[in-house]
Image (tube, rainbow, N blue to C red):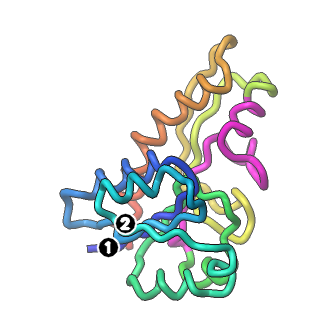
Amino acid sequence: MKNIVIFASGSGSNAEKIVQHFQDTNLAKVVHIYCNNSEAGVIQRAERLQIPCRVFTREEYKNGTILDEIKALNTDLIVLAGFLWLIPGSFVQAFPQRIINLHPALLPKFGGKGMYGHFVHEAVKEAREKESGITIHYVNEHYDEGNIIYQSSFKIDPDDSPEDIARKGQILEHRDFPVVIEKLIKKL
C-alpha cells in the first residue's frame, strides 16, 4: 500500500475525490492532508473523511518541519490539489518525480506565479481561447514548469463566462486527477 499526502489551500473538492477514489483499494491511501490556510474548506472535508489534517505556517514550511513530518509518514507521492505556495527545492530533492500538481489550464499557457483559480479562467476568457483544460505535471522549483504528465481539454463557447470555464475544468479535474494518480502509483 502506497502513502499519498495531499497539500491543499482551498475548498478541497479534488482532495475529497482523491480520498474517495482510493478508499476501497489496497493500492494506496491518503494518509494526511496538509493545509496552509486555516480558513480552507479542505479542513472540514478532511475531518468528515476521517483523514488527519495539519494546518501549518510559512515558517514550519520553510524550516523543514513539514518536510520532516512528510518523510516520517513514509510518503510515496505528494499531490498538490489547489495548493498555492511554491514548493521549496528541499521537497523536490527529497521526493524527485514524486510531487505532482494539477493546474486548471493547458500549460504552458496561463501558468506561473499568480496564475491560479479565477485568475487563470479570467485570463483564458480575456485571451478569447477556443479551448482550455487541465494539466497534471511534476513539480520542480518553479511554478507550473515541471514536465507534463497529462492534459485534457474542453471547448469554450463564445458566451462562456470565467465561471463557466471553471465549472467545465472542474468536471475534468474530478474525473481525471484520481485516475492519473492511480496510474502513477502503480509505477512506484
Upstream in sequence: badge 1 or badge 2: 1
Query: In the image, what residue occupies the spot 38% across and 58% down?
Result: 46
Report the magenta residues as a range.
97-124
Mark on residue 112?
none
What residue is shown with label 2? 185
* Location of residue 159 by image quarter: top right
Q: Residue furthest front?
A: 39
Left or right? Give the position of 188 relative to 137: left
* Location of residue 48 by image quarter: bottom left
Marks 1/2: CA distance? 7 Å
Q: Which of 106 and 162 is in front in this view?
A: 162
Residue 19 in sight here = yes
Residue 43 place in picture, x, y as percent: 45, 57
User: Residue 109 magenta-drawn?
Assistant: yes
Disc 2 is placed on an element classified as helix
Query: In the image, what residue occupies the spot 44% across and 66% down?
Result: 33
What residue is shown with label 1? 2
Disc 1 is placed on an element classified as strand
Query: In the image, what residue occupies the spot 46% across and 33% down?
Result: 171
Quadrant of the drawing holding the C terminus: bottom left
> Mark 1 packing: few (<14 Cα in 10 Å), some, or many (20+)?
some
Going by the numbered disc 2, the residue's amino acid type is Ile
Q: Which residue lies furthest to the top in this view?
A: 159
Left or right? Give the position of 19 relative to 140: left
Which of label 1 and label 2 is nearer to you?
1
Residue 145 place in picture, x, y as percent: 71, 59
Residue 88 place in picture, x, y as percent: 69, 76
Q: Do the residues labelled 1 and 2 touch (CB within 8 Å)?
A: yes
Residue 4 in sight here = no
Query: In the image, what residue occupies the spot 55% across and 72% down?
Result: 97
Residue 81 place in picture, x, y as percent: 52, 55
